[in-house]
Amino acid sequence: MFEQAFKNIDDVLWKEAGCTTELDYTEQTSWLLFLKYLDDLEQDKKTEAQLQGKKYAFILDKDYRWESWAAPKGPDGKLDHNKAMAGDDLRDFVTGKLFPYLHGFKQRASGPNTIEYKIGEIFGEIKNKIQSGYNLREIIDNIDELHFRSQTEKHELSHLYEAKIRNMGNAGRNGGEYYTPRPLIRAIVKVVKPKIGERIYDGACGSAGFLCESFDYLKSKGNLTTKDLSTLQGRTFYGKEKKSLAYVIAIMNMILHGIEAPNIIHTNTLTENLADIQDKDRFDVILANPPFGGKERKEVQQNFPIRTGETAFLFLQHFIKMLKAGGRAGVVIKNTFLSNTDNASVSLRKLLLESCNLHTVLDCPGGTFQGAGVKTVVLFFEKGAPTRRVWYYQLDPGRSLGKTNPLNDDDLAEFVKFQKTFADSPKSWSVDAKSIDLTTFDLSVKNPNGGEEVQHRSPKEIMEEIAALDAESAKVLEKIKALI
């Protein structure tokens, strides 16, 4: 039933002039899902209060509750068509009254980790793009069929929502930056092994895939006490996200996975000055896939000891600083980081090797990230002791990866198994830190077992080589002309 409702919603959005991309579809579905979730949450809390002989204080005023404006019901429990708005009335109410009212919660909330603050933040960041009130009515009717009452319902909805995020990522353009393949995230989580009681952080959380998968991993341990569940709900998962749409998706994704008021802050993480970070701000576990290829302004670069415009390199410095002593991290980064010869790359590799134990490098094949033609590696490190040995694993699924043939959990099973003992194999080997060049700190993936040696060259190096070859060709041509 849920699957059909999602399909119906997409079919209506496809007809809507204001929604032209998968990103629009996900954004518009998200705010409506959020309001339906909020209504179910409030109804459950009202019932709970009544059972205890108490009166429940609703978060939303009566006129702005789902049951009043979106799905007023008659005595038979069915939609009351006389009270239900449609057409221009519905669109004007949503755009002119509902959104401004909900955005106002940001000012009225007691703090950023409250559900009230999240409501205000979400509805200040996104706009209703459904221009036809009749299309909006049809979508609302489909959303009203969805329920968030049981864990089973939430679980099914979370799978459908994840599929929506994946489709958005596969649609290319800037959708891909919000989606890290879940099999890769699950493998990273298994290697880092977070524990209940540890604080887990992603400073570039996108759709919150790392936080959601960590939550599922910790919940699957079983035999959790009420205290454990309370810890998971409020004191375990922390994220920051710069982009409005990703922020909204992250909140909704975590809610669907079972976190009622996610600790996700809408901010540009990199504007924080590293010098201001204190021990109380640090985390036990950091899991992230920071955006790469972006460029940060000069004033943002001033916040970092190693100044560079490359966003991912600034994030890596941030993560090292944000880890507690003994803290563990799994971070996805472009593979050119391992070998770039510019000052920032060399300095950053030196910092990583000297302040952390970089124990594992997972080399991912091309096509791991749909719609992004960039090769990546995953760095696994522990803070507080220098690197002694680096274990490399060259992931090779034995097929070309693509939209119709994505990475799966089986592809990563050997890596997770071998990593436990840092086993040698045709795809894995270790490098003694003493053998690393102390001038370049080059960490290139070079398989000594006859595997392909992967060349990591920066665009600048490639262009310089092309220019050199062109110059050489010109000289040869000159010689030929002279002979003729």
Image: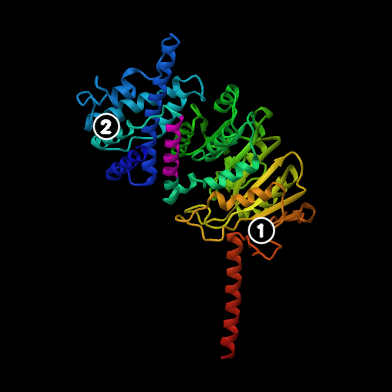
| Amino acid type of the residue that numbered disc 2 sits on in the rendered structure | Arg
Q: Residue at x 59, y 90 (%)?
A: 483
Q: Which residues are magenta?
A: 151-165
Q: Which residue is mark 2?
A: 91
Q: Quadrant of residue 86?
A: top left
Task: Give the camera-side residue of 79 and 347.
Answer: 79
Residue 348 at x, y = what percent? 68, 48
Secondary structure mostly seen in the magenta stretch: helix
Q: Quadrant of the N terminus?
A: top left
Could you say where residue 287 lies in the image, as x and y percent from the top left?
A: 60, 40
Q: Residue at x 77, y 52 (%)?
A: 433
The residue indicated by pointer 1 is 427
Does residue 33 sit above or below 311 in this rendering?
A: above
Viewer-nearest of discs 2 and 1:
1
Residue found at x 33% / y 26%: 98
**Label 2 with label 1: CB-CB less than 8 Å:** no
Task: Tell me if residue 289 can be seen.
Answer: no
Q: Residues within 10 Å of mark 1 (few under 14, many from 20)?
A: some
